[in-house]
Amino acid sequence: MSITEAFGEFRTGKTQLAHTLCVTVQLPPEMGGGNGKAAFIDTEGTFRPERIRAIAARFGIDPDTTLDNITVARAHNSEHQLDLLNELCIRLCEDKQYRLVVVDSIMALFRVDYSGRGELSERQQRLGQMLSKLVRISEEFNIAIYITNQMTADPGATLSFAADTKKPIGGHVLAHASATRLYLKKGRGETRVCKIWDSPDVPEAECTYQITTGGIND
Ligand code: ADP
Ligand code: MG
């Protein structure tokens, strides 16, 4: 019944986590799942059915059924992204089995559509509308929302090692809507680190994980 946001650099596993969740949400509650369906709004063209099949195999569930339980829609611009959410609401009313909605990524199209300096307040206003819709969906239909987000370019990157001056984009509007914020970053070798950046019910903590053929593995 709330939004969880994962932000981090390119290739930290945000999209792989989205795919993994689309499978694990279908597992029975005894296995930590939600026994439900997933909806995936893809703004970057990164949804891959073959990844779903491989992750389903890891959890020992039928790959075809698993794919059938995931509704995927490709958004082409920010207005279309909002239209798709409106369409999704109709589907959620008709089919109460959905337990997860993914938006990967929440900001990418807004960044393209409102790239001018003077357009920031308009962008934030439209973003706010979309996020209120997502919050409403999560509460009304008892659904987990997972969104991915990018980080600001680090202006000091070439001058210093101050990588932590980077932060998620989307400003206060996004910070306010996301109940739980996870910071994903590269760790040693092939490992990655997930840090709880902000949460209303979990202490600040971090864990390591790896991206495997069977999805995110901790
Ligand atoms: P992000 O969305 O954060 O940019 P992704 O979720 O797309 O990142 O993760 C990309 C990473 O996942 C790459 O480092 C890639 O090597 C790894 N990856 C993709 N597919 C597989 C796979 N089948 N097995 C293992 N690693 C994979
Ligand atoms: Mg991605």
Image (cartoon, rainbow, N blue to C red):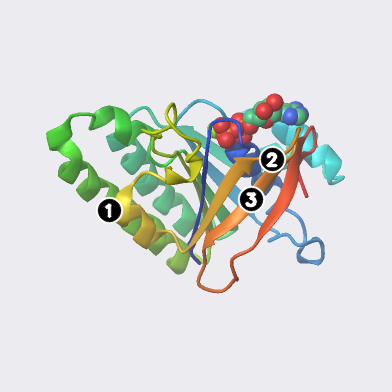
Q: Circle 3 — which element?
A: strand
Q: What residue type is labelled 1?
A: Gly
Which numbered tag is attached to residue 194? 3
Pick the front one: 130 or 212: 212
Residue for point 73% across, 59% down:
33
Mark 2 to mark 3: distance in Å? Answer: 9 Å
Mark 2 to mark 1: distance in Å? Answer: 33 Å
* Ligand 2 within 8 Å of the CB at mark 1: no
Residue for point 67% across, 47% down:
193
Q: Circle 2 — which element?
A: loop
Q: Circle 3: is it few (<14), some (14-19), or many (20+) Cα within 10 Å?
A: many
Observer able to see residue 49? no
Question: In which quadrant of the rendered view does residue 158 lie?
Answer: top left
Relative vertical location of residue 104 with respect to residue 128 in this rendering, above or below: above
First in sequence: mark 2 vs mark 1: 1
Asked whether, in this view, residue 45 is left or right of residue 64, the answer is: left
| Residue 23, x across and y down, in percent | 71, 46
Asked whether, in this view, residue 173 is left or right of residue 10, the answer is: left
Q: Where ligand 1 lies, by image quadrant?
A: top right
**Residue depth check, mark 2 versus mark 1: number of the one nearer the observer:** 2
**Residue depth check, mark 2 versus mark 3: number of the one nearer the observer:** 2
Residue for point 77% across, 61% down:
28
Residue for point 47% across, 28% down:
44
Which numbered tag is attached to residue 128? 1
Q: Mark 2 points at which residue?
A: 187
| Residue 72, x across and y down, in percent | 54, 36
Name, please, the residue furthest toward the right. 60
Question: In which quadrant of the rendered view does residue 132 lie?
Answer: bottom left
Pick the front one: 209 or 18: 209
